Amino acid sequence: MKVTRVFTITNELGIHARSAAMIVEVSNRYKAKIVLEKDGTRVNAKSILGILMLGCPKGSKVIIQAEGVDAQEAVEELGKLIEDKFGEN
Amino acid sequence: MGDNESRQTIVLKGIGVSPGIAMGRAYLLDYAIANVPLYHLRDEAQVWEEIARFEKALRQSRRQLAAIKKSLSDREGMEPFFIIDVHIMMLRDKKLIYNTVNNIKEKRINAEWAMKLTIERYRDIFAKIEDEYLKARFSDVEYVGQRIMRNLIGRDQIRISDVGEPAIIISRDLSPADTVQMKMENILGFATDIGGKTSHTAIVARSIGIPAVVGLERVTREIRSKDTVIVDGCDGFIIINPDPEVLKRYEEKKRHYEILEEDLLREAKRPAVTTDQYKIEIGANIEFVEEIPTAIMHGAEGIGLYRTEFLYINKEQLPTEEEHFSHYRRVIEGQGIRWSTIRTFDLGGDKFISDPKLAKEMNPVMGLRAIRFCLQEVELFKVQLRAILRASAFGKTKILFPMISGLEEIRRAKSIYNEVREDLIRQKIPVGADIEIGIMIEVPSAVVVADALAREVDFFSIGTNDLIQYTLAIDRVNERVTYLYEPLHPAVLKLIMMVVEAAHRAGIRVAMCGEMAGEPAYTLILLGLGLDELSMNPLAIPRVKKIVRQATLEESRALLENVLTVATAEEIEHLVREYMIRRFPDDFSG
């Protein structure tokens, strides 16, 4: 199964060290292959350096694409994380 | 390179962030990545050997970080160390590992060089990120890379705790994770490639009283372990492999400095009272709790200005009430200080949240900042006030509101303060009984309406840096107009007089907490102006106190009166300097 969704980063600092770490933690819980894409650059969501390299400030659009048995759940959980602004106020 | 080779003398200029002079053996904490050896591998067996070495270094790095994290979490009041988790995660990053292993295999190079290539690749990628904050995350990659490199090079001895004999620590930069392991008695001084006055290295050096020079850019490249090095924290440079002549001259300079320092420190704790019995209180301006012991040693009677901005900047999240509280409490309950003046947030909103709406102001020093920002972001302001109020139960507390320009602002601030206070009392949370409320006088309009403001508060504190900049309309960061920045401009002196008079008419006290307060050449003028408290950089206190103790209030008033008869800032400056040199020849030589 392949799931693709687009999200807008809304927390103040964008995807910084702590939020990137949270994405990696969540992604690692899933079997699916998960890819983050911004402006045509694609990185593995299980790699913290990959995510930081994307440089996603507030307001940027990120595509999450997951492929595998639990792809749906993975995208949903990651989406929730982004929409909840990574738990920042 | 044999030991016999006589090495060339090298002088590097940096920023002196902790005064004093140290000389001794260099102890190179980091190999700058530029120093990494390159060699080519002969056969497949060597390739596998290099990969195994790399993997071992990764494991060691992870173990070390886990141990550091554990030792830090045992300490109370430390920041949450999530960043160490991020570093550990980077050490497990498949891409980082794959890239490096691949470099070893394909290019047939040693693990160090392969690692260096990986880091350089990340450096290039991060350099292209536009967002400044996210771009700066490269420092985390660099930190991780250096740790792996240290382990590869096999210097387990790089831990500062193992520095055997007294040495000068040379490093690219020092992090809390480094300094937490140090045995301080073996450390003579610091010299680092990067950093500024508020970097961790600077704060640690000042708090333990050893010389430090930062921002040297290439000290880690120029120096080798065991080189002899002189650190001149007074003038901000270091000398590598000085010839015997220079070494001798520096030994003398060191001796002079220490005698002077000893004399000053011996006297520093005595009060600042003129020979005709006028007592002025002396406070310290600090930013970090760690600075308090040095402040007391240098003769601070209280904390005249505790800046709270560091709690907000370079943070990924807003500080919680508990974080605020733990810092404020440690300041307020500090042993040996009589009062603590805590200034509420004094920056623009752009400093701690990267909200694009706030980020770009044409003229930020006149923009939405300090009290203006707090009065708009009331919830944020309340968190800070609640924490200060809770901490006030532990000692004498004064709260200082920055950048007040008129009555409405102080009334608004006070009403929010009272609301928070009543809330706490209702919840039976203890607050201090004798908290004083004060305002910074730094906007010229506040001087003009000082009489009205004085009826609203318990004290004033004059922030001369901003008062001068706003009064004389000088952008302090614009080099083309800095020549106009004249603390002794007659307009500035007259404004200060107005503030002091208004305060004293209302029966409240006036402090000064700008840089001007710590300049010994101005001490008599400030005495003449009738200030009740001077608060300054802790290291400036002994000299200012010494001048006060030799002076009289009478001569100070006469000097002030005299200089106000001339019309230009330049003439006043000249008259004051001339008087001080004549009157205190020992303190103003050169």
Image (spheres, rainbow, N blue to C red):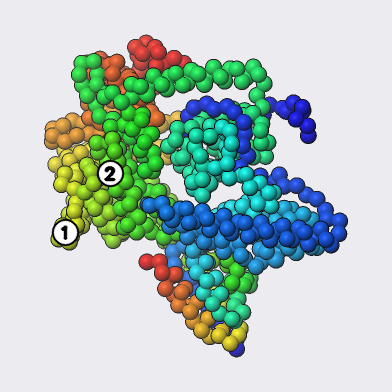
* Residue drawn at point x = 37 percent, y = 24 percent: B265
Q: Amino acid at mark 1?
A: Lys
Q: Position of residue B216 (x, y in %)?
A: 59, 37
Is the C-beta separation of discs 1 and 2 under 8 Å? no
Residue B32 makes an appearance in the image: no
Choose top left, top right, bottom left or bottom right for residue A55: bottom right
The chain holding disc 1 is: B
Density class for disc 1 (Cα within 10 Å; few <14, some 14-19, many ≥20) is few
Density class for disc 2 (Cα within 10 Å; few <14, some 14-19, many ≥20) is many
Q: Secondary structure at mark 2?
A: helix
**Image vertical order of residue B536 relative to residue B159, above or below:** above
Q: Amino acid at mark 2?
A: Ile
Q: Position of residue B362 (x, y in %)?
A: 43, 51
The N terminus of chain B appears in which quarter of the rendering?
top right
**Image vertical order of residue B8 relative to residue B154, above or below:** above
Nearest to N terminus: mark 1 or mark 2: 2
Residue at which label 2 appears = B332
Residue at which label 1 appears = B428
Label 1 and label 2: CA atoms lie apart by 20 Å
Q: Secondary structure at mark 1?
A: loop
* Residue drawn at point x = 35 percent, y = 22 percent: B266
